[in-house]
Amino acid sequence: MKRGLFKNFLVLLVIIGLVSACNLSYFEDAEFGDFVWDASLAVPIGEITYSIDELFDELNDAGAQVGVNNENIVTLSYTEALQSQTASAFMTVLDQNFTGNVVAGVNINNPGVGTTVQVDQSFEFTLSQRNSEEYDSILFTSGNFDIEFSSDFDATIDFTLNVNSLINKTTGDPLSITGTLSPSGPTFTSNNNLGDFKGDFTKDGSGNTATNKVVVDFTYDITVEPTSVVNSTDKVDFTMTLTNAEFETVFGDVGTQGLDVNFQVVNLDFFRDFDAGGITFTDPVFKFVFENGFGFPLGIDFKNITAIGNEGQIVPLSGTATAEPTVLSAPTIDNIGTIETTNFELNSANSNIADLLSSQPRKVIMEVNASTNPANGPDQYNFVDTSSLLDVSVQVDLPLIANINNLVAEESMDFNNGTDLEEAKKLLLRVITENELPLGGNIELQFQDAANNVVFTVTERPVFAAAPIASGDRTTDVATTSVDVEFSNEDIRAIENATKIRVLVRLATTDAASGNSVKFFNDYELKIKLAAQADVEIGAN
Amino acid sequence: MSAMTRKLIIFSFAMALTVSVNAQAYFSYYQLRELVPQTQSLQPAFIPNNSFTAAMPGLNMGLSLDSDFKLQDLLAKETGSIDYAIDFDVLLAAAQDVNQLNLDVTSNLFHFGLKTKKGAFSLFGNVRATVHLQYDREFMDFLANGNANRIGETIDFGGTRLMANSYHEIGLGYTRQFLGERLTLGGRVKQVTGLFHASLAEGATGSITTAADDFSWQIAVQNGTANTAGLDLFLNDQDYPDNALQDYLISNDNSTLAFDFGAKFKLFKWLHLEAAVNDIGTITYKEQPRNYNTQDATVNFSGVQLRGIENSGDVFRDSLESKFTSDETQRQFTTDLTMRTYLSASLFLGERNRFTVMAFNNHVFDEIDPSYAVAYNHSVKKFTFGLLGSYRGNGNELNIGANIASDIGPVQLYLALDNALATNRPEQYSKADIRFGINLMFGYKKWANKSDIVDLDEL
């Protein structure tokens, strides 16, 4: 019995021991904290491949078109349009008047019987025009041609005035005015719409070929009463007034005068990002296309084309192309309403535009002067049609055949990814480039805060190497570069405060120091791969 | 018995303890044997000591958590913090080459036992859940350190396997003695109804190789299928009527038959040999199956096209996903139950003392990786109690278990722990195993016999 009690006691002791040994302090008051995955990940972020035209498109701020020339060389093109004054602004038919009188030429005093005396006279007037303009004819569209007659006869006058230089467009007859003047009604007025007429100023009063001539025949009959008195100095006056004339076409000779052409400023944004260093273009071209609707040849002077450099320096265009005006052909009178196109190139052979563009100009002022009937132009019958206009388009082509030597490009970009870095503790960014371009670059990154203070700098380092050119014009191999950029935890914390990145790129073409230019062919590509190794703390939230 | 035989047996016990062991076992619970009728779930050849048993519904529970890391490795606390954190660095430090996490939760819904002259009948119902996760050190190394320290190398996830099952089982058991009382055979047949499931397909493997130059990934996937069942009722509950989950839990089409078999042989009066194979069967999930499939592929991923990119995280994920052909299907699938095998040899020293050495294997992932234990039980008049030791190989602590059960009737209390020390700062242990319950027991006296146990001291 005692033994059984002992065993029971022993069992009880074990149970008490187990219970009393129970220690759950580890679990007291504890809760699950936020889950955080703390690991170091090597991640291929991705890649981007730039064709060369895309690459320069990025540099260009879309100010230029990026294309290729017939050699498949990438070409930057800037296009601007210039336009001349209109035909109506270039040529105006002046307001003017023509006056004359015709005297009786005989003395009649109480003839006793009634009689009639006829008087006639021709007049030749000259149109007043500007400069040395000589008009043969004008096809009017509107305007006024008013004629006033007055008589000092003490008799009835029946008159006819024929303006031989104004031909009715419908009938083909000259303008003819008839009327009667009497002692009780000594004045007469005729208002005529010039739009009904065309002017023919090619004959003088004698019928000889002339210009700018207005010929008028004036005839009147004097009805003399038996008791009337007519003095030989009695006369009929007339005044022809031409006002507000508008024309459809003017024929003749506009002489030599200036044709105003507006100017344009070509903004070469491509150069805006560049600071120090040099870039030399080998074969830039300014391509002009002139579309002339005026019926006379034009002489174009390029002397006023000017480049404004980075620091305001002025580089004027010079060369043989500026020696004498470039002649633009014109439509003939058989082709009124058509456009005569003249193409002209300013290039390195006829001008200094290579130097002009190698100054890395921010802008080029495109100003051309046009003059009519230049001395070195053809002798051509002139006309001006109301639709006549001179349109000038200019395309600045920069084929990327260049030598770039330590050219520094600068670009600022917004940086708003700071919050994305909150989970990063350490970061290694690997940039791998596979470059077919004969252009290499070192890059420096300056992270700036809102007050433009540099909070962290990734020092300059080669990011993409220029592809080699063993022979010929093309690169012969792909240049591969791998560069690591390491950011410590302190660096990342500093970058979190950045609001923008200032990117400084130092560019150099293959073997730039030799001065050789390289060609950027359209099929070149620059592939950029990004990979990262990051110590991250990723929370469940 | 000769002295040589005795030495041989003791030597065998000692050798068994030197073998690496692993996996949950309910070793201590097993030692309660005929005293607790529910132990038939481990050994169907056990015949209860009493005439009739009625388990208290819902009051018989079991939990076994067994892993290769300590609880404080999983629920780590940083110095000075009282909060838990999942710290993969800690888990990596604790990791072995191959690591297991096994969880078993059992709730005995009901159990009725009837002892007959030659054996016993039982009618029972359980709800069970098992989770088996296996991973190798490389997987944990990836979780702890990412891939950055494995640049230029391949990280192989092929050692990662997952099997999670929950089901209820209702069955009948019958045990009968043969050859007098020397041989006892038991069997149970049960209708198993699958409820919830998640697993990686057999042979599912994956790997990631990080290139040294550009960190690009080569990702390989083979047999990339994850099967689930029943989870959609939770994940998309808005798509189902209110009582859908309840109906599904009570009855569904995922039913099948499974079996438990056991045998007990009294080699000598003082030496009993036992063997049991439980949970033989499969579940075919016909209702609520979901298959998340990724076709076999080896893809290279070099990141995304950066031109014009926005929402880079989404683009990155979409780009990676697009390299794989994945779909979701609702094909039925079949999964094995986690078959369990027990082998034991019991040495009786007198009427009241029993030494047992036993082995257990849960056959998860079709692997043979047994665990072993040696136990001692002592019976007194109204109850039995025992101590048990198990050692599960390098990196695992020695487990000291204990068990106790009363037979004072009609109310029986029992408790079994494979690692009794875990009650004192359980965070320091990698195994927690407990079975407890309350039964109503009747008819002890009818079967009370004189002890047949041979006292070795008298030989």
Image (cartoon, coloured by chain):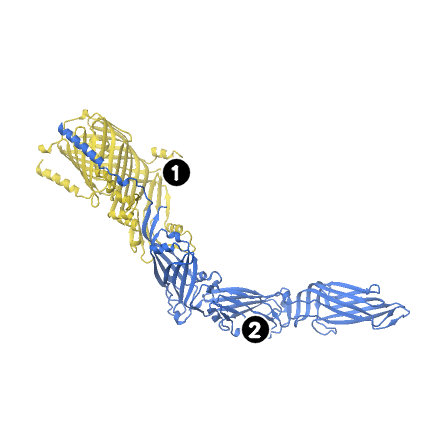
Chain colours: A blue, B yellow
Q: Quadrant of the N terminus of chain B?
A: top left
Quarter of image, res A211 = bottom right
| Pointer 2 chain | A
Q: Is residue A14 visible?
A: yes
Can you identify the residue that label 2 sits on? Answer: A325
Quarter of image, res B116 = top left
Can you identify the residue that label 1 sits on? Answer: B237
Q: Quadrant of the C terminus of chain B?
A: top left
| Pointer 1 chain | B
The disc placed on residue A269 is none
Residue B76, percent from left and from top = 28, 45
Residue at image x 28%, y 37%?
B105
In the image, is residue A422 above or below residue A401?
Answer: above
Q: Is residue B362 visible?
A: no
- The local secondary structure at tag 2 comes to loop
Give the tally of numbered discs: 2
In the image, is residue B237 above or below residue A500?
Answer: above
Same subunit, labels 2 and 1: the answer reads no
- The local secondary structure at tag 1 comes to helix
Residue type at mark 1 is: Asp
Residue type at mark 2 is: Pro
Distance from label 2 to label 1 (Cα)? 87 Å
Quarter of image, res A123 = bottom right
Residue A229, percent from left and from top = 87, 69
Q: Residue furthest right?
A: A112
Residue A164, percent from left and from top = 74, 69
